[in-house]
């Protein structure tokens, strides 16, 4: 009888250990399953796709730069920009298909894109902002050799004027 009781106690102990192991495995499996069903962070929003008649590679190069505040000064300013080729403003290709230029009051280069919505005006500005936003510049004129840009932010336009870029030879 004692032997039978000892065997029974041994069997109960073995069943308890097996039960604990089963519970532990079940808790682990549920924990892992919860990890699998927890939603991950949403993907970054896609960059807006713009159409524009100005391809980025047409803007890359060395440019003389000048600016005017009065439209009567446009021709004179274009000649000043041409003379500025001795110390050119350099536009390089950006890593994501845009061009590297400076934003207003910023001393670091930022990748900008040429953007247009429908048949509206063409702008150059940050790719993640809508065409015509405050950080953009509107393309007033572009013929491949002369680029005239007007700041969209009125306060910035008042300080910097209309920018005239003339391609350096």
Image (cartoon, rainbow, N blue to C red):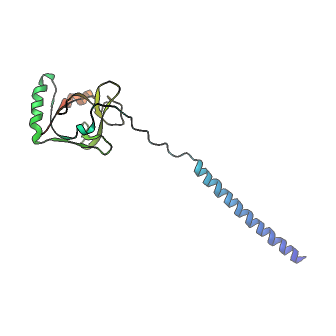
What count of labels does the image hold? 0
Residue 142: x %, y % from top left: 21, 30
Q: Is residue 44 above or below residue 19?
A: above
Viewer-side residue, 37 vs 116: 116
Residue found at the very far bottom of the displayed protein: 3
- For residue 63, side relative to residue 57 (left or right): left
**Residue under the point 34% across and 37% down:** 127
Q: Classify the position of the C terminus by image quarter.
A: top left
Residue 70: x %, y % from top left: 15, 23
Residue 84: x %, y % from top left: 11, 38
Q: Classify the position of the N terminus by image quarter.
A: bottom right
Viewer-side residue, 136 vs 75: 75
**Residue under the point 23% across and 37% down:** 58
Residue 164: x %, y % from top left: 17, 31
- For residue 158, side relative to residue 10 (left or right): left
**Residue under the point 38% across and 34% down:** 49
Viewer-side residue, 42 vs 27: 42
Residue 130 showing in the rendered view: yes
Residue found at the very far top of the displayed protein: 72
Residue 105 showing in the rendered view: no
**Residue under the point 36% across and 36% down:** 128
The image quadrant of residue 109 is top left
């Amino acid at each position: 009888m004692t032997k039978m009781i000892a065997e029974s106690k041994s069997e109960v102990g073995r069943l308890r250990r097996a039960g604990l192991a089963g519970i532990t495995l079940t808790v682990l499996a549920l924990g892992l399953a919860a990890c699998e069903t927890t939603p991950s962070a949403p993907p970054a929003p896609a960059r807006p796709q713009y159409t524009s008649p100005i391809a980025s590679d047409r803007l890359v190069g060395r440019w003389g730069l000048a600016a005017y505040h009065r439209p009567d000064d446009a021709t004179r300013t274009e000649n000043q920009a041409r003379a500025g080729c001795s110390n050119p403003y350099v536009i390089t290709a950006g890593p994501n298909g845009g061009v590297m230029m400076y934003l207003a009051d910023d001393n670091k280069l930022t990748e900008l894109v040429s953007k247009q919505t429908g048949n509206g005006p063409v702008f150059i500005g940050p790719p993640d902002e809508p065409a015509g936003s405050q950080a953009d510049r509107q393309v007033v004129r572009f013929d491949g050799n002369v680029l005239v840009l007007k700041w969209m932010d009125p306060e910035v336009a008042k300080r910097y004027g209309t920018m005239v870029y003339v391609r350096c030879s």
